[in-house]
Image: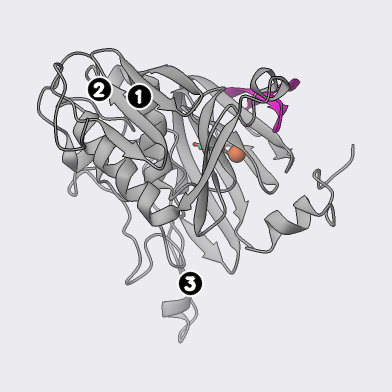
Amino acid sequence: MSNASVNECGYRAFSLGAYKFVRDEYFAHITWPGGSHTISVDRFLRALMRDVAWNFFYGTVNFDEVFGTTNHYGTVDVFAGLYNAGFRERNKQFVEALNGDHVRSTFLEMLEDWTNEGFDPFAAPEETGTPFGPKRGSNLSAVRRNRVVAKRMVGLKGDTPLRSDADGNPVNRQFTDVDQSEPEVHAEPGFEGEVHAFNFFAYLSRSDVTWNPSITSAVKDSLLCPTTEEYMLPIIHGNDRVEWFVQLSDEIHWDVQDRESGAPRARVVMKAGDVTAMPADIRHQGYSPKRSMLLVWENADPALPDLYAKKRLRPNPVDF
Ligand code: PHB
Ligand code: FE
């Protein structure tokens, strides 16, 4: 089927390298030479949204136990069964290295065509409509949303703005108890343009998306990426560097597995105030029973994946 024609449910089919993607009322179906796979379309669209918005993120974005992408920062490996012990045992994995821009534009077209009116893949399930059923309109403003990326820090002149009721960012229903007062800044004369502060909790309480770390401050490669979480991380992230997590409110339960095989390694229950260093050789998925605030601290140094791959750095930054 060509990319322009639609099926009986009203959805376009897509091809990418040797992969073919079709959706029906409930499922995304993926086929490749030698195999096929089915993913519930709510899970598929939520994962696809993040892969597109994050430009393939750091390392591996597993949509589920079978399908996903690994970022090589220019090219992208699109794989099926590559990080699945069962596929690997029978040598049934399939992987294609493709141009990143091409994968991203194809994924965005698919996301735009397959997302129905009223469904926002970034929203918590309680705060959005259904993705299921035959094609019904679209939600382009939601799926084309850009991630917040501060150049230096949120709220600085010329940088990404603070959030308010007036600009359409109300306090989330689960964060109505968060103090909204802003800090007072008293700079010495001559330093007025160099001192800045804002209420981080108030800023986060007004986020309308979930599982979407945004860059709120950048000092060289040190990126503070807070995010508000509710329900589950719709991908299983395979790290290519260490990530530090600080649980700012409520709690998140994490499944931590071996990055290559998916074998279980740890269960981590993080409560407000807890800090973890997620190793560079794991994959993880988080579950947030109530909306919570999580600070993800990323080191964006492009040399890191190679240093870990060559074992020049240990995958865990601290020993206890
Ligand atoms: C992660 O994989 O480290 C991750 C991704 C998205 C989040 C939080 C953590 O919202
Ligand atoms: Fe991660």
| In the depicted structure, whether residue 267 falls above or below residue 140 | above
Under mark 1, the amino acid is Ala
Instruction: Tell me if label 2 and label 3 are in contact, CB under 8 Å.
Output: no
Cα–Cα gap, marks 2 and 3? 39 Å
Pointer 1 residue:
124
Sequence-wise, the earlier of marks 2 and 3 is: 2
Pointer 3 residue:
195
> Going by the picture, which residue comes out furthest to the front?
33
276 to the left or right of 177: right
Pointer 2 residue:
128
Total number of numbered labels? 3
**Is 275 in the magenta?**
no
Instruction: Tell me if label 3 and label 1 are in contact, CB under 8 Å.
Output: no
> Magenta stretch?
250-272
Q: Residue at x 47, y 50 (%)?
A: 98
Q: Is residue 274 visible?
A: no
- Residue 109, given in percent of the width and then of the height, sits at 25, 42
Q: Residue at x 40, y 34 (%)?
A: 19
Under mark 2, the amino acid is Thr
